Image: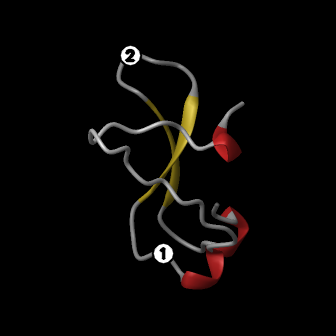
Amino acid sequence: MIDSSRIKDGLIEENLEGGIELYPHFYGVLPIDAVIDAIAFPCNADGSFDLPVELNI
């Protein structure tokens, strides 16, 4: 997870092409102190991925 209040420049709210909902996009060098959590996201034996339970909403 990223604490966006710790990012000074490069964070832009943009929509997807044809969309209206805005999503944060970051363009730049990410300051390491902005990273407040990391979640393991390993692939399965067949190379597929399952969303980690911490990210299920």
Category of crowding for the residue at label 2, using alpha-carbon neighbours closer than 10 angstroms: few (below 14), some (14–19), many (at least 20): few
What secondary structure is found at the residue carrying circle 1?
loop
Task: Residue at 46% x, 18% y: name it.
Answer: 19
Q: Nearer the viewer, mark 2 or mark 1?
A: 1
Q: Quadrant of the N terminus?
A: bottom right
Q: Position of residue 56 (x, y in %)?
A: 67, 34
Whether 25 is drawn above or below 15: the answer is: below
Does label 2 or label 1 sit earlier along the sequence?
2
Quadrant for residue 42, please give it. Answer: bottom left
Q: Quadrant of the C terminus?
A: top right
What residue would you read off at disc 1?
30
Q: Nearer the viewer, residue 11 or 43?
A: 43
Q: Nearer the viewer, residue 26 or 39?
A: 39
Q: Which mark is residue 8?
A: none
> Is 30 on the left-hand or right-hand side of 55?
left
Q: Which mark is residue 18?
A: 2
C-alpha distance separating marks 2 and 1: 28 Å
> Is 22 on the left-hand or right-hand side of 17?
right
Task: Residue at 48% x, 36% y: name it.
Answer: 50
Whether 34 is drawn above or below 48: the answer is: below
Find out whether the residues at labels 2 and 1 contact each other: C-beta distance under 8 Å: no
Whether 57 is drawn above or below 5: the answer is: above
Task: Residue at 35% x, 23% y: name it.
Answer: 17
Task: Residue at 60% x, 66% y: name it.
Answer: 38
**Type of amino acid at the residue the image marks with label 1:** Leu
**Type of amino acid at the residue the image marks with label 2:** Gly
Q: Nearer the viewer, residue 56 or 22?
A: 56
Furthest residue to the left?
46
What secondary structure is found at the residue carrying circle 2?
loop
